[in-house]
Image (cartoon, grey):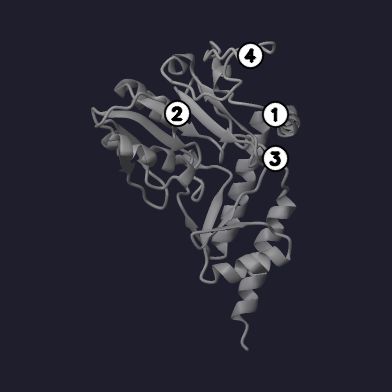
Amino acid sequence: MLAQGLDWQPGDRIAVPACEFPANVYPFMNLRKRGVEVDFVPHMDATFLLEDVAAALTPRTRLLTVSFVQFLSGFRADLSAIGALCKEKDVIFCVDAIQGLGALQLDVEACGVDFLACGGHKWLMATAGTGFIYVTEVLQARLSPMAGWLHGPVDWENFFDYALEFHPDAERFRLGNTNNIGIAALHAALGLHLEAGQAWCERQVLARARELTEGLQVLGLKRFGTDDPRYASGIATFSHPSAEALFAYLSERRIHVAMRNRLLRFAPSYYNSEDEVRRVIDAVKSYDQGVMQPG
């Protein structure tokens, strides 16, 4: 909706960190056929500095898109500082929030976010096929929405009187029938999240991730990303000399982690307990001790 909705001109530029998930890259790379260039912000272990972002912005940069939380390293971007930079440079600020919302608190207005997209099947703990976008009213006026059939008023008595009209608000981005079952699941999941309390959820997520990180580092695992608490999230990723074998070992013990780029990504949530974190650490220790046994 964002990539195809703006009136791009040849020579316009888009900035994006070179460590983004493909979903936050390909829609913008696809604009190259319209003469739009993509500038990649350099990174180190999927982390980057505000200065790196500032250096990537040019006078022709119209949009910057970043993840709230980087999918592999768990790097939590300083959205407030980046949003202020975008406002200063008159650059549209887009955020992919799927790896952060539900685990961490976010105030889109305070951070100066113009456009946000988020799926519901990760930290929000709803079903696949659900999600939402947030668009400021100022940006809504600049976007040309795609046409479906529910993007505007429907004359239920005269379907053959085709009038291409759009709703005056964000409902214009609705193209057709919605995933009602998925929306009900998302509603229930959000209800649980809000009942627990967003601040409490964030404290729990960060505490479990910190306990896990400290425990695995004691065992000698090297973290991918940064240990700086300012950029902490619920994701903690580690390298291991036998990553695939350890992944299988943990899976057999019903410990669910993700394998990405031959790295092990752990993502404890607010419902996980300290005992469960200890179980993960003990399992990794048990695996390493078994591997090192002679014979």
Q: How many marks?
A: 4
Tag nearer the camera, 3 or 2: 2
At mark 3, the secondary structure is: loop
Residue 158 relative to residue 33: left or right: right
Question: Which numbered disc flags the more N-terminal residue, 2 or 1?
Answer: 2
Q: Residues within 10 Å of mark 1 (few under 14, many from 20)?
A: few
Q: Is residue 277 above or below residue 103?
A: below
6 or 292, nearer to the observer:
6
Residue 191, position in %: x, y? 74, 28
Question: Which numbered disc flags the more N-terminal residue, 1 or 3?
Answer: 3
Pointer 3 residue: 127
Pointer 4 residue: 154
Tag nearer the camera, 2 or 4: 4
Pointer 2 residue: 2
Task: Locate residue 150: give its quadrant.
Answer: top right
Residue 97, position in %: x, y? 53, 35
Q: Residues within 10 Å of mark 3 (few under 14, many from 20)?
A: some
189 or 135, nearer to the observer:
135
Residue 41, position in %: x, y? 33, 42
At mark 4, the secondary structure is: loop
Question: Which numbered disc flags the more N-terminal residue, 2 or 4?
Answer: 2
Judge whether residue 107 can be spotted in this image. no
Task: Locate residue 279: give its quadrant.
Answer: bottom right
Cα–Cα gap, marks 3 and 2: 24 Å
Kind of residue sitting beneath label 1: Gly
Cα–Cα gap, marks 2 and 1: 31 Å
